[in-house]
Image: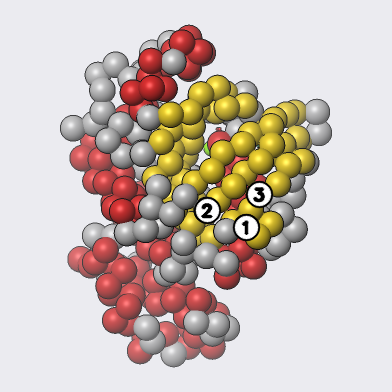
Amino acid sequence: MLQVRQLVKHFGGLRAVDGVSFEVGPGQCVALIGPNGAGKSTTFACIAGQYPLTGGDIAWNGQALQGLSPQARLRLGVARTFQVAQVFEALTVLQNVQLAIQARLGQRAVSAFRRLDSQSREPALALLEQTGLQALAEQDALSLPYGAKKRLELALALAARPRLLLLDEPAAGLAGPERAELMQLVKRLAGQGMAVLYTEHNMDAVAGVADRVLVLIEGRLAAQGSFDEISRDAVVRSRYLGQAGGEAGSEGGGHA
Ligand code: ADP
Ligand code: MG
């Protein structure tokens, strides 16, 4: 269980996250949504270990995470992806995943790279299948279409065998069926028992995916509940859904 209590993160005078508390249990798929600049990525970075906290605390299965490096958190089962996909562009898709598995197994990256082609091939192929990338296994990561790169980043996170998976806008930059498919994959991961927390700034990646939705506005949780509950929430409607037409709008409902 992830427990975030009174999380505060300031950048100089800017209160990016200003007293946020929530929990995510195993098997739950929770969405952290809100307009651009609300503090979603910052909240993530605090949980995954990229930023020291200004205040509050974060515990995973009862153990305090603040003060631990991202690598130490990864060893405890906490893995993340980034809003802009980060993969090893000089390697093939398969090699990327092989390398990530080798990293979990404690091989040093350089020696693993030399003997990579024979290593962890089967589990890597299984991860490619799980993320729908089998057909692209031998392609260079550099030349991947963006949607495939987002999937690859997810496969790399899964290679760590996380128990808590943090996904920062997993479907960012994707549209239509590709977007819907990726979100269903995210939902399935929670169905397998992982605790999943993902950010989004569009409502359409929430309906039918998230078990619970946290709405972050200007660094504070404005509401939390089911998709239906937060869609009806007066504050959420006026301060988030009501604004800026398309981006945050729930009208027109979910994706196909
Ligand atoms: P979101 O992911 O919800 O769009 P962010 O967490 O990226 O929002 O940003 C929240 C606020 O914090 C924004 O005003 C952003 O400009 C600011 N911010 C984010 N990262 C940094 C940083 N490293 N240094 C200074 N300000 C930052
Ligand atoms: Mg962000």
User: What is the three-letter code of the residue carrying label 1?
Assistant: Gly
- Disc 1 crowd rating (10 Å Cα; few below 14, some 14-19, many 20+) is few
User: What is the three-letter code of the residue carrying label 3?
Assistant: Ile
Spatial separation of the CA atoms under disc 3 and disc 2:
11 Å
- Disc 2 crowd rating (10 Å Cα; few below 14, some 14-19, many 20+) is some
Q: Which mark is residue 1?
A: 2
Judged from the image, the secondary structure of the residue bearing numbered disc 3 is: strand
| Nearer the observer, 197 or 103 | 197
| Nearer the observer, 93 or 9 | 9
Q: Residue at x 41, y 36 (%)?
A: 212
Where is residue 84? Give x, y as percent: 48, 47
Which circle, 1 or 3, is nearer the viewer? 1
**Colour convention:** secondary structure
Q: Horizontally, is 135 left or right of 73 in the view?
A: left
Where is residue 248? Give x, y as percent: 41, 21
Spatial separation of the CA atoms under disc 1 and disc 3:
9 Å
246 versus 31 height, above or below? above
State which quadrant residue 193 falls in.
Answer: bottom left
Residue receiving disc 1: 62
Ligand 1, image quadrant it occupies: top right
Residue receiving disc 3: 58
Q: Residue at x 51, y 60 (%)?
A: 79
Where is residue 183? Give x, y as percent: 31, 44
| Nearer the observer, 62 or 177 | 62
User: What is the three-letter code of the residue carrying label 2?
Assistant: Met
Which residue is the extreme one toward the front?
62
Which residue is the extreme one toward the right?
12
Which circle, 3 or 2, is nearer the viewer? 2
* Image marks 2 and 1: residues in contact by CB distance under 8 Å: yes
Judged from the image, the secondary structure of the residue bearing numbered disc 2 is: loop
